C-alpha cells in the first residue's frame, strides 16, 4: 500500500494472436514504472497490492473458439507470476485471485500473498460474447471479489467489491455504433451471480448483478475507438500531431471514446487518465518500436478506465481513484498494438452506517437493464463458435498451419476420391 491506500496495477495488451509468444520473457518494462512511482510517493519501493493483466487476441482464433487455451493460459500465468516476484523489490509473493478466459480474451488478477490476498473472498468470474451470433471473437470477461476493510485498518467488519472487466470491441473506424452496442451488450449480459449471503444487491432478474454493482469498477482492453479527424486533415498531418503533446492535446477532441463517453453513450460515468500524453498505441508495423502502419489511422485503441463509489456522474474529470501512472510500453514489437499499463491508487474505505456489512455500491445507469435472454445468447454464441472453430482448426491442421491450404487440399482430395470412384468404361 501507499499512504495506507490500496494500489492496483492494470495492464492490457492485444497480443496479435501470438499465443505463447504473446509476452516477452522479461516483463520489467511493464513493472518498473509502478515501482519507480511507489518510491517517489512513499520513499520506498513497494509492489502493487493487486495486479490485473488483460489480453485480447491471445491465441489464433480457431484455437480460441474451440477452447484450446489451457496450455497458453498456464504458460502466461507462470510467466507473469514469476516476473512479478522476481522484480518485486521486497521479494513479495503473489497468488492468482481469479482468471477468466473466453476465446482470445483473457484476464488474470493477482494479489500480494503477504497482504490483500488474505482478505479476499467470494471470487466470481464471468464471460460474454458480442461477435456475430454472439460468438466470442469480440466480447468481455470479468473477475469480481470482495476485500475486507480490515486490510486498510478499518476493523468494522465491512467489505468492498472490486470488479475488473477486460473487453475487445468491434474494430474499424466507421463501426462506432457497433462499439456502442458492444458495450451495452456487455453491461446487459456480463452478469455476476449473487453470493448466497445475499450481500450483493438484486438486479432485475433477482439473481444477478451487472458490472456497475460494485464499489470499484475497472474496464479496460482493446476498445477499438479511433481518431475521427476532420476530412481536411491529411494522414501525414495527423501522424505529425500524434508525435507531439500539443498535437495530441488537439487530437483528443476527435477521439471517438471521449466524445461518446461525454455524451453518455458508452462507458457511462467511467473516468480515465491523461491518455493524450502518450502516443497512439495502434497501428504499428510489426517488429518496429515507433513506425506506424499506413493502412490505418493511428489511434488510442487500448484504454484503461475506472470509477468508484462517490464519483460525481456530472463531472467525469474527477475521481476518488488517483491515476499515478498511465503509459504504453513501446518496446513490445510482436504486435501492431502497444501494451498499456496504469497504476491506480484506491481511496480509503468509506465509513458505513452501523449494522451494514458493505460500503455503498455504484448506481447502474438506467439505460442498462439486464437482458432476459442473456444465458441463451451466451451459449448460442459458444456452441456456434465451437462448431466453426473445430471446422476451421481441422482445415488449419490439414494445411500444416494454413487454413486456406487445408481447404484447397481437402477439396483436391475429395475431387481425386470422386474421380477414383468414377466407373471406367
Image (spheres, rainbow, N blue to C red):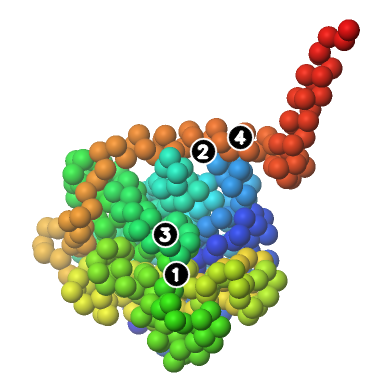
Mark toward the start of the polypeptide (4 vs 1): 1
The residue that disc 2 covers is: 385
Asked if 40 appears above or below 316 in the picture, the reply is below
Q: Total marks drawn?
A: 4
Q: Write down the quadrant of residue 83 in the picture.
A: bottom right
**Which residue is drawn at the image coordinates 25% and 48% (left, top)?**
209
**Which residue is drawn at the image coordinates 41% and 69% (left, top)?**
304
- What is the distance, in whole Å, between disc 2 and disc 4 at their CAs? 8 Å
Query: Of residues 300 and 75, which is closer to you in this image?
Result: 300
The residue that disc 4 covers is: 390
The quadrant of the rendering that contains the N terminus is: bottom left
Mark toward the start of the polypeptide (2 vs 4): 2
The residue that disc 1 covers is: 226
Q: Are marks 1 and 3 in contact (CB under 8 Å)?
A: no
> Which one is in front in this view, the residue at disc 1 or the one at disc 3?
3
The residue that disc 3 covers is: 175
- What is the distance, in whole Å, between disc 1 and disc 2 at their CAs? 27 Å
Amino acid at each position: 500500500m501507499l499512504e495506507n491506500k490500496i494500489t492496483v496495477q492494470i495492464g492490457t495488451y492485444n497480443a496479435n494472436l501470438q499465443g505463447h509468444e504473446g509476452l516477452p520473457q522479461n516483463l520489467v518494462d511493464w513493472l518498473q514504472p509502478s515501482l519507480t512511482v511507489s518510491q517517489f510517493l512513499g520513499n520506498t519501493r513497494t509492489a502493487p497490492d493487486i495486479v490485473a493483466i488483460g489480453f485480447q487476441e491471445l491465441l489464433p482464433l480457431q484455437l480460441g473458439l474451440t477452447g484450446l487455451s489451457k496450455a497458453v493460459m498456464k504458460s502466461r500465468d507462470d510467466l507473469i507470476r514469476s516476473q512479478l516476484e522476481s522484480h518485486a523489490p521486497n521479494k513479495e509473493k503473489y497468488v492468482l485471485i481469479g482468471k477468466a478466459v473466453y476465446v482470445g480474451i483473457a484476464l488474470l488478477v493477482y494479489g500480494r500473498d503477504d497482504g490483500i490476498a488474505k482478505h479476499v473472498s467470494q471470487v466470481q468470474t464471468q464471460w460474454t460474447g458480442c461477435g456475430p451470433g454472439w460468438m466470442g471473437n469480440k466480447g468481455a470477461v470479468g473477475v469480481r471479489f470482495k476485500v475486507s476493510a480490515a486490510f486498510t485498518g478499518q476493523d468494522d467488519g465491512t467489505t468492498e467489491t472490486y470488479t475488473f472487466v477486460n473487453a475487445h470491441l468491434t474494430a474499424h473506424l466507421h463501426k462506432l455504433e457497433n462499439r456502442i452496442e458492444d458495450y451495452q451488450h456487455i453491461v446487459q449480459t456480463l452478469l455476476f451471480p449473487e453470493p448466497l449471503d445475499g450481500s450483493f444487491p438484486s438486479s432485475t432478474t433477482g439473481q444477478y448483478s451487472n458490472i456497475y454493482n460494485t464499489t470499484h469498477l475497472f474496464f479496460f482492453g482493446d476498445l477499438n475507438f479511433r481518431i475521427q479527424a476532420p476530412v481536411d486533415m491529411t494522414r501525414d498531418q495527423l501522424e505529425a500531431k500524434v508525435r507531439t503533446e500539443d498535437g495530441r492535446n488537439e487530437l483528443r477532441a476527435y477521439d471517438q471514446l471521449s466524445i461518446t463517453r461525454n455524451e453518455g453513450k458508452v462507458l457511462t460515468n467511467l473516468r480515465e487518465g491523461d491518455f493524450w500524453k502518450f502516443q497512439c498505441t495502434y497501428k504499428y508495423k510489426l517488429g518496429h518500436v515507433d513506425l506506424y502502419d499506413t493502412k490505418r489511422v493511428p489511434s488510442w485503441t487500448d484504454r484503461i478506465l475506472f470509477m468508484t463509489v462517490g464519483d460525481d456522474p456530472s463531472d467525469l474529470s474527477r475521481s476518488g481513484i488517483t491515476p499515478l501512472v498511465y503509459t504504453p510500453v513501446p518496446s513490445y514489437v510482436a504486435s501492431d498494438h502497444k501494451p498499456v499499463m496504469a497504476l491506480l491508487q484506491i481511496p480509503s474505505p468509506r465509513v458505513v452506517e452501523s449494522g451494514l456489512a458493505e460500503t455503498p455500491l455504484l448506481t447502474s445507469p438506467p439505460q442498462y437493464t439486464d437482458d432476459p435472454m442473456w444465458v441463451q445468447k451466451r451459449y448460442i454464441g459458444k456452441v456456434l463458435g465451437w462448431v466453426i472453430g473445430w471446422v476451421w482448426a481441422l482445415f488449419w491442421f490439414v494445411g500444416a498451419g494454413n487454413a486456406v491450404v487445408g481447404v484447397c487440399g481437402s477439396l483436391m482430395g475429395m475431387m481425386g476420391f470422386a474421380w477414383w470412384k468414377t466407373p471406367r468404361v
